[in-house]
Amino acid sequence: MVYTRAYKMRLTMHFLMRRISILERRVSLVRQLLGSFVLIAMGLTAPAIVAQKVELSVDVSKGGAKIDRNIFGQFAEHLGHGVYEGIWVGPDSTIPNTRGIRNDVVAALKALKVPNVRWPGGCFADEYHWRKGIGPQRTVTLNPNWGGVIEPNTFGTHEFMDFLDQIGAQAYVSVNVGSGTPQEAAEWLEYMTTAQPTTLAKERASNGHPAPYNVALLGIGNESWDCGGNMTPDYYLSQLKIYSRFVRNFNPAQQDKQQMLKIAVGPGGTEPRWTDWTETIMKAYQHHQWSWDMNGLSMHNYTVGHWPPSFASVGFGETEYAQILKFTLDMDDLIAKHSAIMDKYDPQKKVALVVDEWGGWYAPLPGSNPGFLVQQNSLRDAILAALNLNIFARHADRVRMANIAQMINVLQAMIMTDKEKMVLTPTYHVFKMYVPFQDATFVPVVFDAGTYTHGDVSLPRVDAIAAKDKTGKLWLEVTNIDPNQPTEIDINVPGITPKSAAGETLIAPKVDSVNTFEAPHTILPKPVSAKAQAGKLTLKLEPKSVTVVAIEQ
Ligand code: AHR
């Protein structure tokens, strides 16, 4: 065998590097041994981890905006096993179901008090034709966006509405602007909502639902700047006006108090083109006439790091933990930026900013269909969810709705299923712990968050929000981002002597701990309480934890 000069050089370098690395390992071992000798010689053990102290004051004298329960909304797209298998198994399945909808999933979702579900997509919505999903004979089509698989259309309008009834949520229906027509969307709404005996209403009745459905929220297109049709802001605006004018809700119960809210497509990232988009839509809204209207502007923002998604969803360490949480905190700036534009044209904040796609988006799980967006859900996701919910709460005057992507088996899911098995993710537990914040009134909290640093990433060590629910009960959420140090929070409520605080805390052994079908209870909320002393409460937080307590006054 003849070695080239370059190859020989590479070989020499390789051996050199190996020797250096062996040498380094030896030096480090000697250092460790020396360290231990010194500790033993001094009669000492390794230093105990000391809890960091944080003073936190809850200002009950100042009330903020209502934290609209719709910010705890969900998103169920025809994508991978999000709908089929995740929700719909069909009435003949051996998996226990009610009219084809999984009983275990329904029971789990009921506990979350899900306010609304966005459906049928996503990118899927702009290729969805509703007539294919009604009646006894369903048209079998394709799902070109998500793996090119068969779309049986067995889960259509009636099944979606049945699912919502079973879990107690409201409908957020996205109509097809990309490849549909205003007439198709208008007829869908007539089919769903009219109480008059029109041909479409009779067809609805013959398909099993004589009473009109309630459609609380209408999405006019999805990401129309991209998968929804690559439209310019001006072109989309012209479509928005037409759809807003003609796609009517006829339900008699929704003509006065419960009017359907119309959500326009909004920005999707940090580049200047997104501020242009918000400017165009909101400027037009400022001068809008009676003939068109909108009640919300959508915003999509995933925690991805960079495209295509390449962060692992499991099997990562502290570096990726810190990096992802750093990325997720960008949500705050993005909301602030678009809220400022909206304030210019809508100072009364009539139009809500609707963050209807958010969450962590990581590399597909090895072995899964990349078009199905399957990923694991770890403790990092629980912290990510809490941080985002807190950001939404702090912007509650403008952010009145949000939908995590997605509900089941897709991206940052609440629930994962595999045939008859089901597991609740850490994100599910966070959503459950936050139920008391639904429709509660934001109460300001003041604290010095301190800093947690790992490598070149610095983050606030803790995050917190507080709110008063309708019964007057005070709730506090505190996230300890630091994965290594516990935190001791001294809670003051000026003007009040708090008696006690109790609630739940979500902890896990590792930053990438997950619940699996085999070990579903690795991450479960545990009871926690605070000690009252000298007019204040002291709450001990484990490293990397999410805690919600009710403060008794
Ligand atoms: O949630 C997955 C996809 O992400 C949605 O279909 C689309 O709207 C977004 O790009």
Image (cartoon, rainbow, N blue to C red):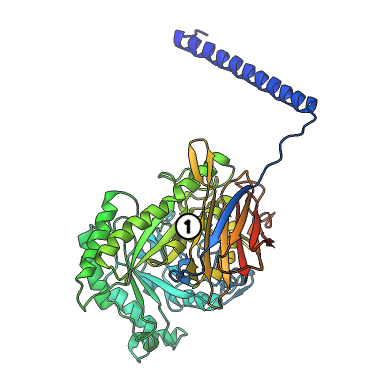
Dot 1 alpha-carbon crowd within 10 angstroms: few under 14, some 14 to 19, many 20 or more: many
Q: Foreground: 449 or 227?
A: 449
Residue 254 sits in which quadrant? bottom left
> Which residue is labeled 1 in the image?
388
Secondary structure at badge 1 equals helix
Q: Foreground: 186 or 399?
A: 399
Instruction: Please report the residue visible at 34 percent of the width from the left and 79 percent of the height from the top.
Output: 189
Residue 173 percent location from the top left of the image: 39, 72
Query: Would residue 267 be seen by someone viewing this image from the given angle?
Result: no
**Three-letter amino acid code of the residue under disc 1:** Asn
Query: Would residue 485 be seen by someone viewing this image from the given angle?
Result: yes
Q: Foreground: 462 or 370?
A: 462
- Ligand 1 location (quadrant): bottom left
Residue 336 percent location from the top left of the image: 36, 57
Instruction: Please report the residue visible at 62 percent of the width from the left and 19 percent of the height from the top.
Output: 24
In the image, taking residue 184 as reference, residue 52 lies left or right, namely right
The vertical placement of 119 against 299, above or below, is below
Instruction: Please report the residue visible at 75 percent of the width from the left and 24 percent of the height from the top.
Output: 38
Q: How many marks?
A: 1
Query: Any atom of ligand 1 within 8 Å of the CB at mark 1?
Result: no
Q: Foreground: 451 or 28?
A: 451
Q: Quadrant of the C terminus?
A: bottom right
Residue 499 sits in which quadrant? bottom right
Residue 252 sits in which quadrant? bottom left
The vertical placement of 318 against 222, above or below, is above
Residue 464 percent location from the top left of the image: 53, 58
Residue 188 percent location from the top left of the image: 35, 77
